[in-house]
């Protein structure tokens, strides 16, 4: 008897359409595009500030007030901040389990600690920026 | 005991006759308390004796009856009829070559198991005669969940990374390596990390997490892999900064 194992083909471009689990993962990964956009935006703002041009700065502020840009920020912020943060913080206990003696610390405590650290660091950044 | 007539669509493949797999339908009178494995056994015993598949213990211990049940990698002895619709599609585990019908070729994973060095490695002298390496319960609980793996390979069938790149070592083998790495009696962590923290090891994992979701024994291989990434990064820094090895 001859062995002729059959290999099922896997599409390199549409594999994530196979199930909801993969689609959810891709939704998380695609947030990197927004990180890229925000990096670009930050560099742009820094370049304007470095040039010292009041005219360019005012033009930038005006460009950020158009409804489409405001809508983009709102969607990006909600999608990026809420979805990405929620998803990664949910996974944090897997990467950083804490064992106290013979007991494993419940996952929710590790997740809450991440949200708390996020809040404290955000407040510190706001304080540095003179917002509070 | 009441019965329910179910339609099983089973993937068939005979390497000596078929160019590609196809589905064959069987109508099976299933009893309420059956697992899907019982329905497959019914087919084998009463309808079609040519059907090939693996099973042994029927109690979630041997790990041989892993199959795709309605597209989900499942232990068929743990997947109950009462939780399934009237029509069920049964396929061999995805991401593995099909040997015949529902039997897959597992050679690749068996080969990768060697790379994990799944045994305790000691660098110092053996313990005095009639003694063993002692371990506290706290140490044991650190890795106990990873000892629960029964090599059913459902995690490999769920892993899109393994589907796309067969050089990836994969979830179960990495979880097993992690089990020994965090065992307080073991001293072979740096030996394993040389292989497992390489490109085809933990860094190939992009944390889809599907392996942990389908694991019938709650081993959570995705957690093991993420912890190994941290260990691998630490080891890399140690070697860069002072040539230190754990």
Image (cartoon, grey):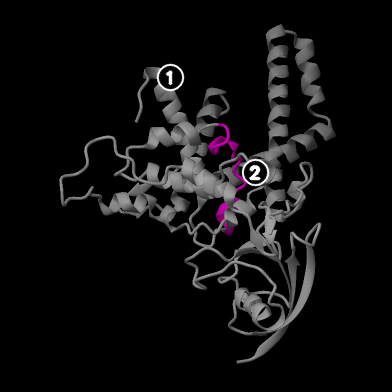
Q: Which mark is residue B240?
A: 1
Q: Where residue B231 appears, x then y in whole percent?
A: 44, 35
Q: Which mark is residue A32?
A: none
Q: In 3D space, how far apart are the residues under numbered discs 1 and 2 (Cα atoms)?
A: 29 Å
Q: Where residue B116 appears, x then y in whole percent?
A: 46, 42
Q: Which residues are magenta?
A: B199-214
Q: Is residue A101 visible?
A: no
Q: Is residue B240 left or right of residue B214?
A: left
Q: Secondary structure at mark 1?
A: helix
Mark 2 nearby-residue class (10 Å; few <14, some 14–19, many ≥20)? many
Q: Is residue B15 left or right of residue B60?
A: right
Q: Is residue B18 left or right of residue A21?
A: right
The chain to which mark 2 is attached is B
Q: Where residue A77 appears, x then y in whole percent?
A: 69, 38
Q: Is residue B123 visible?
A: yes
Q: Give the position of the C terminus of chain B as an image quadrant.
A: top left
Name the residue carrying label 2.
B161
Q: Classify B9 as above or below B120.
A: below
Looking at the image, which residue sits at the far bottom?
A: B1
Q: Where residue B68 appears, x then y in whole percent?
A: 67, 63
Does the magenta-highlighted stretch encompass residue A65? no
Mark 1 nearby-residue class (10 Å; few <14, some 14–19, many ≥20)? few
Camera-nearest residue between B104 and B198: B104
The chain to which mark 1 is attached is B
């Amino acid at each position: 008897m001859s062995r002729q194992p059959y290999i099922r083909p896997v599409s390199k471009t549409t594999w994530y359409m196979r199930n909801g689990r993969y689609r959810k993962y891709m939704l998380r990964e695609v947030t990197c595009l927004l990180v890229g956009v925000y990096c670009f935006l930050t560099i742009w703002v820094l370049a304007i500030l470095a040039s010292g041009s009041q005219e360019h700065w005012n033009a930038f502020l005006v460009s950020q007030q158009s409804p489409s840009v405001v809508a983009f920020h709102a969607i990006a912020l909600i999608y990026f901040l809420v979805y990405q943060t929620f998803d990664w913080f949910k996974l944090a206990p897997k990467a950083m389990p804490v064992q106290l003696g013979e007991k494993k610390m419940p996952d929710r405590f590790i997740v809450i600690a991440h949200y708390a650290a996020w809040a404290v660091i955000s407040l510190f950044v706001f304080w540095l920026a003179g917002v509070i | 005991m009441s019965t329910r007539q179910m339609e099983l669509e089973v993937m068939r493949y005979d390497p000596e006759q078929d160019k590609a797999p196809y589905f064959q339908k069987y109508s099976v009178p299933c009893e309420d308390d059956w697992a899907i494995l019982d329905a497959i056994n019914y087919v084998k015993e009463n309808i079609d004796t040519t059907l090939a598949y693996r099973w042994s213990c029927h109690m979630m211990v041997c790990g041989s009856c892993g199959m795709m049940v309605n597209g989900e990698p499942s232990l068929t002895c743990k997947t109950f009829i009462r939780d399934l619709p009237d029509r069920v599609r049964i396929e061999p585990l995805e991401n593995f070559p099909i040997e015949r019908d529902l039997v897959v070729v597992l050679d690749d994973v068996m080969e990768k198991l060697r790379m994990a060095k799944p045994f305790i490695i000691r660098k110092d002298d053996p313990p005095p005669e009639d003694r063993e390496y002692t371990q506290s319960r706290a140490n044991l609980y650190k890795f106990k969940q990873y000892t629960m793996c029964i090599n059913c390979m459902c995690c490999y069938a769920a892993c899109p990374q393994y589907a796309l790149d067969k050089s990836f070592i994969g979830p179960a083998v990495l979880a097993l390596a992690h089990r020994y790495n965090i065992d307080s009696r073991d001293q072979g962590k740096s030996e394993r990390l040389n292989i497992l923290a390489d490109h085809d090891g933990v860094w190939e994992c992009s944390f889809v997490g599907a392996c942990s979701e389908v694991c019938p024994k709650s081993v959570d291989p995705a957690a093991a892999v993420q912890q190994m990434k941290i260990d691998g990064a630490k080891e890399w820094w140690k070697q860069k900064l002072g040539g230190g090895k754990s």
